[in-house]
Image (tube, rainbow, N blue to C red):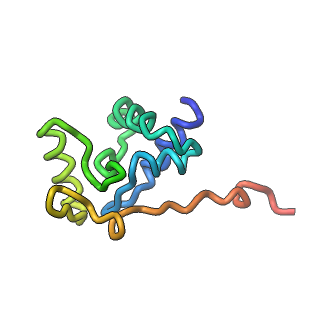
Amino acid sequence: MQWFTRQVVEIIRDIPSGKVMTYGQIAAHAGSPRAARQVVRILHSLSKKERLPWHRVINAKGEISLQDEEGRFMQTMLLEGEGVELGLGGQIDLDTFLHHPVKKDTAENTDPL
């Protein structure tokens, strides 16, 4: 697995219940701010294998991006089950529900002197 892919998988795994992140936000935290479409690809190909909480990833407008009704319904139900509220038009209030991960401190990976 490539470095960027590993970073994306780890970030998605760490999204807590009741919170969401956007594709672009995940890409930026993984070190490649312009790779939102790559995050989509990773979610599509690895969600089941890596047991990722795929339903916690939404678009920058605070909306579910899935086009098919079944997938959209499933994502809505999973998010609402975790307490995420979808407003009129299915929009999620990012001020309330957006997860802001803490960047891993490189100091914690170094040996003390």
Kindly indicate the quadrant of the structure image that contains residue 84: bottom left
Q: Residue at x 38, y 36 (%)?
A: 40
- Specify the quadrant that holds the N terminus: top right
Query: x%, y% of residue 54?
Result: 32, 45
Q: Residue at x 55, y 45 (%)?
A: 30
Query: x%, y% of residue 89?
Result: 15, 56
Give the side of residue 45 with respect to residue 29, left or right: left
Q: Residue at x 33, y 60 (%)?
A: 17
Task: State how many labels appear.
Answer: 0
Give the side of residue 58 with respect to residue 68, left or right: right
Q: Is residue 98 above or below residue 63?
A: below
- Specify the quadrant that holds the C terminus: bottom right
Query: x%, y% of residue 110?
Result: 77, 55
Q: Residue at x 13, y 46 (%)?
A: 73
Kindly indicate the quadrant of the structure image that contains residue 102: bottom right
Give the side of residue 94 with respect to residue 111, left or right: left
Residue 100 vs residue 2, the one in the foreground: 100
The furthest residue to the bottom: 96
Query: x%, y% of residue 21?
Result: 39, 54
The furthest residue to the right: 113
Residue 66 vs residue 82, the one in the foreground: 66
Give the side of residue 19 with respect to residue 102, left or right: left
Q: Is residue 102 above or below residue 1?
A: below
Q: Is residue 59 above or below residue 105?
A: above
